[in-house]
Structures are given as C-alpha cells and as structure tokens.
Amino acid sequence: MDHLKKTKKAFNEYVDQYRKYGDKILLKINHSVRVSELCRDISEDLGLSADDIELSVICGLFHDIGRFEQWDLFWTYNDMRSVDHGDLGAEVISKGCLFTVFSGKERDTVVDVIRYYNKYLVPEMISDRNRLYVNITRDADKIDILSMYVEGKYNNLTENNILSETVYQKLLARKPVRKEDISRKDDEIAIRLAFIFDLNFRRSFEIMKKNDYIGRMIDIQKEKISNRVLIDQLEDLKKQLNKYIEEKTAIL
Ligand SMILES: [Fe+2]
C-alpha cells in the first residue's frame, strides 16, 4: 500500500471510534477530507513536488485530529469552553499509535501544522518549511469553513441590527476580526467575512472568486433581513471585499 493510502487508512480507523456520536463527528470527518483536497489544490498551484503535495494532503487530513477527542471529552467544539483543539490534536498525534504511520521527516511538520494552524499568529520560531504547510492548511481550512457557511451548515444572521461600528470599520480597513472584537452574536458573520484578510496564496483567492463565497454569503444574509441600513452595509461590504480578492489575485 502506498504511503498516502496508509495514512488515510490510519485516519479512518482512528475516527471510526468516534462515529457513534453521529452528525457532529461526521461534519468534522467530511471537513477534514475536503480540507485535504483543498491543500492538494493549493500546493499543486504552488508547484510543489509530488512528495511535498502528498505531505500537504496529509496535513490537511489530520489538521483537526484534536476535534474528535475534544467532542468525546467536552461535547463541544468551542475552544473557549474546553481546550485549544490544535494543542489537543498535537498531543493526540504525538502520544498515540497514529504517530507511527508518519515517516520520520513528516512528523515534525504534521505536529506543527496541527498545533499552529488555528493560532492567532503562527510563531516565529517554526521552520520556513513547516510554516509553508501551516499556511496552506490555514487557507484550506478557512475556504472550507466559508463553503459550509454558504451551504447553511452554520447559523446565519437572524437579527436586523447593523454591524457594530468597530467590526464594520475593521472590515473596511481590511483587518482580521477576532472573537475578542465581537460583543454580540450578530457580529459573528464579520469573523467569517474577514477570513479573506488571512489568506496567503493566489490560488486561495482564485477559489474564493470562482465560488463567489463572499457574494453568496452576503446574499444569504440579505434574504433574511429587512433593515435597509443593514442591507446597504452588507452590499457595500460585498463590493469592498470582492475588490480586495480581485487585487490579491492580480498581485500574488
Ligand atoms: Fe478545520
């Protein structure tokens, strides 16, 4: 069996023990598989070697490995109410039998990706090589979260409140929006929209553009609301954010 097949088998065997929890686990299994394919797409576009593309696929597949134990232990995917799922995942990989499936030179990269892909900032001290895989996985993860948002797998705006001034200005200034910036549930959409300011690669912007994730996300919100000021605010954001995507696709 080739190496990629072996790692996929190990992943499937590991997650099988959590399938008893149903849809919540299936959501993460399917997300992991899609993220691994997006990692392939981005790394192919970067012109990486066949071995490096394979490693990037493996990183994508395993990036959320901590989610399964997180659900088993805490019955939530909310890191603030449980543990950091990246740290937990790095521990799961390093301690368990899963570790043996990776080749010696892969281990360090896979562990760094799992531990750091979800952090606010990727620490300076990691190697350039590992940083590349962390960034590919970060992009792939964000793109897939946006695709799930568009498909209605997350809660959307239900209120008619306009976005708070702080959050709106951050989006216009092309700055990431963090959980700490959000003071009410209505503003949560801003975190997802601002994902684009954290993307690293040309191909990621191209995928965003091709699927019109920003436009579709905003249109879904608009259908549910009647507040004219909020509708105008969202329309303005759609224009500004798509302009940013256009610019990045041209520059990178
Ligand atoms: Fe993820």
Image (tube, grey):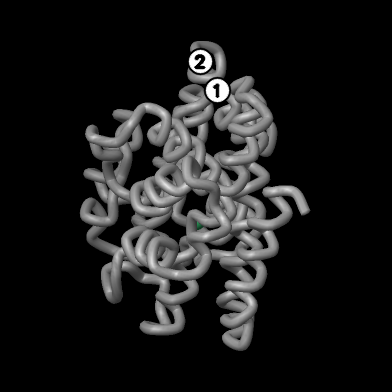
In the depicted structure, whether residue 136 falls above or below residue 14: above
Q: Residue at x 54, y 52 (%)?
A: 102
Q: Which mark is residue 163?
A: none
Q: Position of residue 154 (x, y in %)?
A: 53, 65
Q: Position of residue 185 (x, y in %)?
A: 34, 65
Question: Could you tell me how many numbered marks the image carries?
Answer: 2
Say what amino acid the circle numbered 1 marks: Arg
Badge 2: how crowded within 10 Å, few (<14), some, or many (20+)? few
In the depicted structure, whether residue 240 falls above or below residue 169: above
Residue that carries the numbered disc 1 in the rendered image: 202
Q: In terms of sequence position, does the residue under pointer 1 or pointer 2 come before the other? A: 1
In the depicted structure, whether residue 70 falls above or below residue 122: below
Q: Position of residue 213 (x, y in %)?
A: 60, 42
Q: Residue at x 47, y 40 (%)?
A: 105
Could you say whether the residue bearing mark 2 is in a helix, strand or loop? loop
Quadrant (top left, top right, bottom left, bottom right) of the N terminus = bottom right
Q: Position of residue 133 (x, y in %)?
A: 47, 37
Q: Residue at x 60, y 59 (%)?
A: 31
Q: Quadrant of residue 220?
A: bottom right
Q: For the residues labelled 1 and 2, say whether their Cβ atoms are less than 8 Å apart.
A: yes
Q: Which mark is residue 252?
A: 2
Say what amino acid the circle numbered 2 marks: Leu
Q: Residue at x 52, y 65 (%)?
A: 98
In the depicted structure, whether residue 20 falls above or below residue 245: below
Mark 2 Cβ inside 8 Å of ligand 1: no
Could you say whether the residue bearing mark 1 is in a helix, strand or loop? helix
Q: Nearer the viewer, residue 36 or 217?
A: 36
Tell me the CA gap for discs 1 and 2.
5 Å
